[in-house]
Amino acid sequence: MLDKLQNLDEKYEELGHMLADPEVLGNPDELRKTAKARADLEDVVMAYREYKQASEELNDAKMMLDDDLDSDMEQMIKEEIKTLTATIDELENKINILLLPKDPNDERNVIVEVRAGTGGDEAALFAADLYKMYVRYAEKQGWKIDVMNSNETDGGGYKEVTFMIIGKGAYSKLKFESGVHRVQRVPATEASGRIHTSAATVAVLPEADDVEVHIEAKDLRIDVFCSSGPGGQSVNTTKSAARVTHIPTGLVVSCQDEKSQQMNKEKAIKVLKSRLYEKMQEEQHGEEAALRRSMIGSGDRSERIRTYNFPQGRITDHRINLTTHRLEQTLMGDLEELIDALVSTDQARKLKQAAEEVEA
């Protein structure tokens, strides 16, 4: 492993020199490619350099124990050895994680679809809560939000809402949010105080590039219609909303939030491309998906992944058996604890798989 890390360090330095090369600087595509390649190596190279430094300091400290030392100095060096040993163990674990194969979609923007499930108006209100939760989380990360399509209800909920989150690493953080989210609470309209259970589905799709998903014009059917507001009433008389059907797969996407028919059509096609890209990925990586499903669930929108219990202020993620009592903070966009736990579980699974492959 150390030889591999040293090679990565040398490659990192080489890429740094290339960034100062006039030929590279004069070629925007090459410059962007080189800068990205260097940035991708930076975390693991910095961790390796810390590891080398700590290892050298540990060797020096151990050699000092061979000298004739007074008891205070000897005790101080032993404490230093203990600290350095712990640091090296942490860095080894960090490096092992950084060397794991990366999900090629991790750095992408995402398209998130939230739909009300069982539970009528209460499910629609919960879908709105989830939408606001993700918007607040994105804002805390400094990411941008672009609403692609929404279908509001009279009570302020959403039958469905589709939006893009634009920010580096958005997919790496949010990819485990796909599935059925269940809520248990007393609706405002419930006079007897009885707790109701409702649900909403979330689908998180990596944004697809035009190069990766090419759609032939003949494979699309595009219908236009008047956009509607809460409750389904028409909000204008011009046919600005667009419905795009991909004939070979039967996938249908509608967008109506923009005033321009062309913009709604473009947004619908963007969502369609992301759905087709997800379908391609599932077909190509069926084995990897099965392994991931065994640890943290499939991410399928039909799978119940999390319960939000309002009377107890509790959230339970069923995939990793994690329960927290920070319901209010989570709905305000504080998702780090849940996301970090899911990412850590996924990393542990990959480390175990890598170790088993080495042993085999």
Image: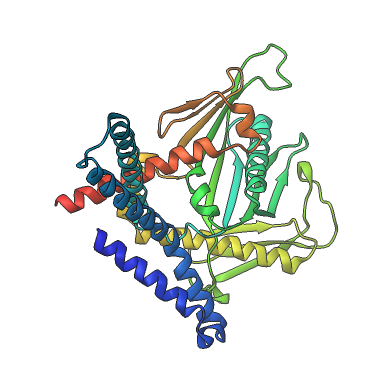
Q: How did the renderer colour the structure?
A: rainbow
302 up-or-down from 216: above or below: above
Does residue 130 appear to the left or right of 72 in the view shown? right
Closer to us: 88 or 352:
88
Percent across and percent down for residue 277 are 48, 63
**Relative to 272, residue 119 above or below:** above
- In this image, 4 relative to 102: left or right? left
Q: Nearer the viewer, residue 66 or 175?
A: 66
The tally of labels here is 0
Q: Residue furthest left?
A: 360
Please give left or right for residue 1 compared with residue 285 in the image: left
Report the quarter where the N terminus lies.
bottom left
Q: Residue 142: x percent and y percent? A: 65, 52
Can residue 12 be seen? yes
Residue positioned 78% across, 62% down in the render: 240
Toward the viewer: 123 or 69?
A: 69
Vertical order, 148 against 208 (above or below)? above
Name the residue located 55 percent from the left edge and 53 percent from the top edge.
170
Determine if residue 102 is in view: no
User: Residue 106: x and y, percent?
Assistant: 47, 57
Residue found at x 66% / y 29%: 122
| 10 sits left or right of 191 in the view | left
Residue at the location (43% across, 44% down)? 343
Residue 62 placement (x, y as % from top left): 24, 43
Residue sitting at the far top: 192
- On screen, residue 58 above or below 286: above
User: Quick one: 227 or 208, which is closer to the camera?
Assistant: 208
